[in-house]
Image (spheres, rainbow, N blue to C red):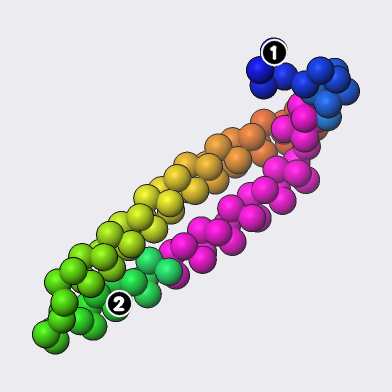
Amino acid sequence: MAGHSENPRDDNAQHDRFRDPDAIREELRVVDEDLARLRETAKELRARIGDRADAPTDMTEIGALINMADEQDGFIATLEARREALLRRLREATEHHTG
């Protein structure tokens, strides 16, 4: 069975972790740190592109910087979606533990 543990305890532990508000908060903290780092990197890349816009530069280099910034934006969008999913899980887990 792909994706399932042979040990039912492992499945229960994973299910508990899925519902554990503290584990979700920790994962959310890591995602928030990653988002902050990626946003800063994308900002720096875009600033480098802007700094070069008025100077004679290699268009290949500018294109590479734009591609890198666009990739960062894609990673940011993925992490933002992950963050929203974690927030939903946290709300559900909190309701489960208090209800």
Q: Is residue 28 magenta?
A: yes
Residue 36 image position (x, y, % from top left) = 51, 64
| Residue at image point 49% right, 48% down | 79
User: Where's the C terminus, which quadrant?
Assistant: top right
| Residue at image point 65% right, 55% down | 29
Q: Is residue 99 visible?
A: no
Give the residue number, with chain letter if any, for mark 2: 47
Are the residues tagged 2 and 1 within 8 Å (C-beta)? no
Give the residue number, with chain letter if any, for mark 1: 1
Q: Secondary structure at mark 1?
A: loop
Front of the two marks 2 and 1: 1
Q: Which kind of residue does numbered mark 1 sit on?
A: Met
Left or right of residue 77: residue 11: right
Rendered view: 44 above or below 37: below
Residue 86 image position (x, y, % from top left) = 60, 40
Residue 15 image position (x, y, % from top left) = 76, 26
Residue 54 image position (x, y, % from top left) = 13, 84
| Residue at image point 29% right, 78% down | 48
Q: Which residues are magenta?
A: 14-40
Rendered view: 28 above or below 39: above
Q: Is residue 60 visible?
A: yes
Q: Secondary structure at mark 2?
A: helix
Label 1 neighbour load within 10 Å: few <14, some 14-19, many 20+: few
Residue at the limit of the structure toward the top, as seen here: 1
| Residue at image point 55% right, 37% down | 85
Q: Which kind of residue does numbered mark 2 sit on?
A: Ala
Left or right of residue 1: residue 78: left
Label 2 neighbour load within 10 Å: few <14, some 14-19, many 20+: few
